[in-house]
Image (spheres, coloured by chain):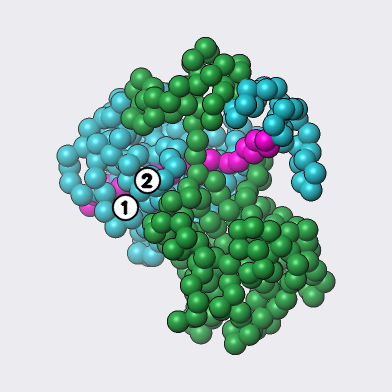
Chain colours: A green, B cyan
């Protein structure tokens, strides 16, 4: 950030009075520009014994498999965002959303929220940011080709919890530097 | 937003190619300025049969009681943010945080996350944005003078769940216009 989005003057980077961390402050109008973490919301859509995955058409992790998810927008709930992303990325409709994983990705200042959901029907197809969409049983999941650690975690949790039929909200903090956790590791 | 924070040129407000909603786009460098919801994180600190509340010294809802909470910062987890806000607003230390409420406040584009936590000791006091801090049993809670609907919800959930000893994560969407839900209603 170099310029004030309110008045166009240059900004300085220093700790405002009464604050305890540096912010971008306008040198002309004194507007303080706060920067805060973003929320990524998505679904783990289930159909019979299978889970819907999308093959990414965009970076990062182009060509790897993921759950449908993306940045939450202003003016929607996290649940709305998860349903919208599922519709946009997989042209799929889901119901009965239950908050399932909440993950802080500390180094990239994101919080990811994944909902377990019922896939309504088999009318799905690849959206603009996706090259392929499919349903996978536990044995068929492309464990070596998953895009992100958070997706791997959600799938591991799901197949473990399915044995008990109880799906408590899972809460994980990922503190490792980017690169060591963003990419899912190969199958152990 | 009137000016590009990258280069200082004016911005236009229109739908970028491949997107489906209007964004602020720089007329010179084409940088797209996304605006996304913010996370508010806080604690419901418990000591024996009492809950810690803070009396707000700032707007909105100056003079009303709340749980210690505030905007999550970049580079921390939601749990870190909840502990930091509890330290800053009540000079209090907490342990054993459990994610307890997740509320989308749709009209103000915020997601609030409250953790149930154990208050470590009685060494607490009012921080800069607080005029008073106290411990309240269920009967003593100032139900008519709570700052926000989300705080009222968290307290109601807590005292109900305490009867069973089980505290599942509670997930609420608040869609009503600002003013009708931001302020907690008087006691029913």
The residue at 45%/22% (across/down) is: A12
Residue B101 in the image: above or below residue B22: below
> Residue A46 is drawn in which quadrant?
bottom right
Q: Which residue is mark 2?
A: B82
Residue at disc 1, secondary structure: strand
The residue at 37%/25% (across/down) is: A15
The residue at 80%/69% (across/down) is: A125
Dominant SS type (magenta): strand
Q: Are marks 2 and 1 in contact (CB under 8 Å)?
A: yes
Q: Is residue A179 left or right of residue B177?
A: left
- Name the spot of residue B3 as percent of width and height, x first: 65, 23
Q: Which residue is mark 1?
A: B117
- Name the spot of residue B140 as percent of width and height, x first: 31, 39
Write the start and end of the magenta stretch as one range. Answer: B31-50
**Residue furthest bottom as drawn:** A139
- Name the spot of residue A150 as percent of width and height, x first: 51, 65
């Amino acid at each position: 950030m170099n310029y004030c989005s309110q008045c166009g003057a240059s900004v300085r980077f220093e700790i405002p009075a009464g604050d305890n961390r540096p912010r971008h402050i306008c040198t002309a109008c004194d507007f303080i520009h706060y920067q805060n973490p973003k929320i990524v919301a998505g679904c783990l859509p289930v159909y019979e014994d299978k889970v819907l995955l999308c093959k990414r058409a965009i970076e990062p992790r182009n060509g790897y498999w993921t759950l449908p998810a993306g940045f939450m927008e202003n003016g929607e709930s996290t649940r709305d965002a998860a349903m919208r992303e599922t519709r946009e990325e997989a042209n799929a409709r889901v119901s009965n959303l239950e908050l399932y994983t909440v993950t802080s990705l500390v180094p990239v200042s994101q919080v990811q929220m994944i909902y377990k959901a019922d896939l309504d029907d088999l009318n799905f197809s690849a959206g603009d940011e996706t090259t392929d969409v499919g349903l996978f049983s536990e044995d068929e999941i492309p464990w070596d080709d998953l895009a992100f650690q958070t997706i791997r975690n959600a799938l591991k949790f799901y197949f473990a919890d399915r044995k008990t039929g109880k799906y408590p909200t899972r809460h994980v903090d990922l503190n490792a530097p980017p690169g060591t956790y963003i990419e899912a590791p190969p199958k152990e």
